[in-house]
């Protein structure tokens, strides 16, 4: 579950009051009823599915595999043999689950400092990588593993403190671990609501991974938090397994956005006030850190951040109102010999309908294209890497900037026949050579845009196969049916439809395949994809007559061969694979080590050295092309000096981007091809 930095404390305070006086079975049955009535691929729960919901429920309670063993799982599944209702899965397992939580809570309270600080024990431990961890066979094995896991957390926190140059007694570190863990499990033990919420989500996510249950507080605060905040730093985060904060969203136009230094996926390790006082995330309480965020006198904070590649940076942000510039999308001109190419990075499909205010991304995109055309370009690169989606109508409007008119895609909502998704505006804003740069994490609306341009032969798709999400969700109140009225404190995010390309095929669970593939370290890593999520909706097709006028097919043979030759000359595949293999060894190794401070510190230090060295030199050597601003943006920089530094940071980052470098070469070949 993701939490906004601005509403986290409110949710903590109200979490203990959720579902008060609400009958659990009534809520469970109504949740299933509403989802089934609106879901595009509804299911009828049967005994087989009861067991699948139980598995999801147990994993939600115990994502670290330290509470339940295989014997527990077998016992609980045995209890479901006589179940006749989805409600039974909750009621018939609740007592046993609480007993196991109580047992683990006792283990946490009994953690012994002497065991944690003893570096002479010969016990071997595999650093947990939860995507491959299996439940221990029995309670005895589980107890041993759980203690070792907590010792690993203890040693890892010691290393984090060392890196932050903070001295903290071992006793204090252990107290932090115990306090956080007992609070976590006591919440489940003292409030049926906490377990019930996880169970309702387990039901929702059995339909598909994007359907969720929300209470009224989550729904309201999630939608309105930013609008209610006068000042903010402009980013959201989620709490990681080791109690650190991972950035999940950068708000367009905010301080974090304008800094150009903070990215989705960054880990916040430490926060520093202007007076020098520091808060260490994972050690100091979340309430203290939240107070540091909201205090009026703390208008400037310094965030100590670890980037995805392991490098550490300090980012100083000043609270500000969410100020959306006339155009939050910046275009650049890239010069290669006598050629001039436009480059636009689209990080998300935001809309003027959102709380951010200002124009939607399609309007911003149009203005940026006009600026690039004014400065004369020979081709355009639209970068969708890392764009996880957003408003579908914005994606369709952007597609219409490059396509004259016609059906762009198809949509099917439950209970309705397939319907056309048409270009909302007739005419073309840009008719030149176009490349879309996509990656593994381009999803949803990004895939819709890339797929439309590919199907129309309007653009060359370069990069990697995309995430594979071609479904649409809507949030509805639980009382949206007459039969469920009276439960208006709860909401459901439900997958109500699917979209298809003009060939009547979907990219759901398949992704958009690039016309010209570029190797990536993610090709050799177990990255998240739609097809890897439990109970994802399977790909299908629709039957509907689609008449469109396509652009001439792009001759890719020569362009592709030239790119492949450059990749071979640069030894791209072997070098990316080597980097990926090293990352895999550090982050998800199956090798065991003796569990002591020396080995954990040695492992973390080696990891840091590797990532820092990797960030200093490109995986593939190249000489970057010149990158400059548009003439209009240069004028804006003269009038608004505070944007100069972030702008230069962005340009410097683009110059390190080897995949962009090769995309420019591909576009160059494309523009000179007869």
Image: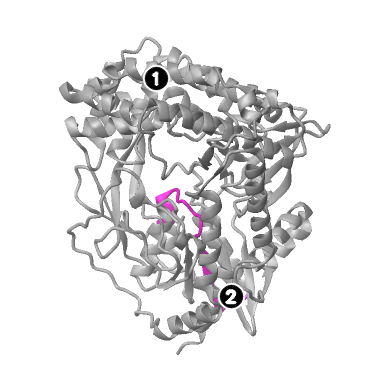
Q: In the visual, does 586 lie left or right of 144?
A: right
Which of the 4 quarters of the picture holds residue 205?
Answer: top left
Report which residue position mark 1 lands on: 100
Tell me the tag on residue 215.
none
260 lies above or below 561: above
Residue 383 lies in the magenta stretch: yes
Residue matched to label 2: 341
Residue 160 horizontal/vertical position (percent): 68, 39
Q: Residue at x 27, y 24 (%)?
A: 75
Task: Please report whichever mark, 1 or 2, sits nearer to the chain's N-terminal start.
Answer: 1
Of all residues, the one furthest to the top in this rendering is: 21
The residues bearing labels 1 and 2 have C-alpha atoms spaced at a distance of 61 Å
| Quadrant location of the C terminus in the rendered image | bottom left
Residue at 63% across, 71% down: 333
Callout 1: helix, strand or loop? helix
Camera-nearest residue between 486 and 274: 274
Secondary structure at numbered mark 2:
strand
Q: Quadrant of residue 399?
A: bottom left
* Residue 222, visible in the rendered structure: yes
The part of the chain drawn in magenta is 375-396
- How many discs appear? 2
Vertical position of residue 389 compared to residue 209: above or below: below
Which quadrant of the figure has residue 294? top right
């Amino acid at each position: 579950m993701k939490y906004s930095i601005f509403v986290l404390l409110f949710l903590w305070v109200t979490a203990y009051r959720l579902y008060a006086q609400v009958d659990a079975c009534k809520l469970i049955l109504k949740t299933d009823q509403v989802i089934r009535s609106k879901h595009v691929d509804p299911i009828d729960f049967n005994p087989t599915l009861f067991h699948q919901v139980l598995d999801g429920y147990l994993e939600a309670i115990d994502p670290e595999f330290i509470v339940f063993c295989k014997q527990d799982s077998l016992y609980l599944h045995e209890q479901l043999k006589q179940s006749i209702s989805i409600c039974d899965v909750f009621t018939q397992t609740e007592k046993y689950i609480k007993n196991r939580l109580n047992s683990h809570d006792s283990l946490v309270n009994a953690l012994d400092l002497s065991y944690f600080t003893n570096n002479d024990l010969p016990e071997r431990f595999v650093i947990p990588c939860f995507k491959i961890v299996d439940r221990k066979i029995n309670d005895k094995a589980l107890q041993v593993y759980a203690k070792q896991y907590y010792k690993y957390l203890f040693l890892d926190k010691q290393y984090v403190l060392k890196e932050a140059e903070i001295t903290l007694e071992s006793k204090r570190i252990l107290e932090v671990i115990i306090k956080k863990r007992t609070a976590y499990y006591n919440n489940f033990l003292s409030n049926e609501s906490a377990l019930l919420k996880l169970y309702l989500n387990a039901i929702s996510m059995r339909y598909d991974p994007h359907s969720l249950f929300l209470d009224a507080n989550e729904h309201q605060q999630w939608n309105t938090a930013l609008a209610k905040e006068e000042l903010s730093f402009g980013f959201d985060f989620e709490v990681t397994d080791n109690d650190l904060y991972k950035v999940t969203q950068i708000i367009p136009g905010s301080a974090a956005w304008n800094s150009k230094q903070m990215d989705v996926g960054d880990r916040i390790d430490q926060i520093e006030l202007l007076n020098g006082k520091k808060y260490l995330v994972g050690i100091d309480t979340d309430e203290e850190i939240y107070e540091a965020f909201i205090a009026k006198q703390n208008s400037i904070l310094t965030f100590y951040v670890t980037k995805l590649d392991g490098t550490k940076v300090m980012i100083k942000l000043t609270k500000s109102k969410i100020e959306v510039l006339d155009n939050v999308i910046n275009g650049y001109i890239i010069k290669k010999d006598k050629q001039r190419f436009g480059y636009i990075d689209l990080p998300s499909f935001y809309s003027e309908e959102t709380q951010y205010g200002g124009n939607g991304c399609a309007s911003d995109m149009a203005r940026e294209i006009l600026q690039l055309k004014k400065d004369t370009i020979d081709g355009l690169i639209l970068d969708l890497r890392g764009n996880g989606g957003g408003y579908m109508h914005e994606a369709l409007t952007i597609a219409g900037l490059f396509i004259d008119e016609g059906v762009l895609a198809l949509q099917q909502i439950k209970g309705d026949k397939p319907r056309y998704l048409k270009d909302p505006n007739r005419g073309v804003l840009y008719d030149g050579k176009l490349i879309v740069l996509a990656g593994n994490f381009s999803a949803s609306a990004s895939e819709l845009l890339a797929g439309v341009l590919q199907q129309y032969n309007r653009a060359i798709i370069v990069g990697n196969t995309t995430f594979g999400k071609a479904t649409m969700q809507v949030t509805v109140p639980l009382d949206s049916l007459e039969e469920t009225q009276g439960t208006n404190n709860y909401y459901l995010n439900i997958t109500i439809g699917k979209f298809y390309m003009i060939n009547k095929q979907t990219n759901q669970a398949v992704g958009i395949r690039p016309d010209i593939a570029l190797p990536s370290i993610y090709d050799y890593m177990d990255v998240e994809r739609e097809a890897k999520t439990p109970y994802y909706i399977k790909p299908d097709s629709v039957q509907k007559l689609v008449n469109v006028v396509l652009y001439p097919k792009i001759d890719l043979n020569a362009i592709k061969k030239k790119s492949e030759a450059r990749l071979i000359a640069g030894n791209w595949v072997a070098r990316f694979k080597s980097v990926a293999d090293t990352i895999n060894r550090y982050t998800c190794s199956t090798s065991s080590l003796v569990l002591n401070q020396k080995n954990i510190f040695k492992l973390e230090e080696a990891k840091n050295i590797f990532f820092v060295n990797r960030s200093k030199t490109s995986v593939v050597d190249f000489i970057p092309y010149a990158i400059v601003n548009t003439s209009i943006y240069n004028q804006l920089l003269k009038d608004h000096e505070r944007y100069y530094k972030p702008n230069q940071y962005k340009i410097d980052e683009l110059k390190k981007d080897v995949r962009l470098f090769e995309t420019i070469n591909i576009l160059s070949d494309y523009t000179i091809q007869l």
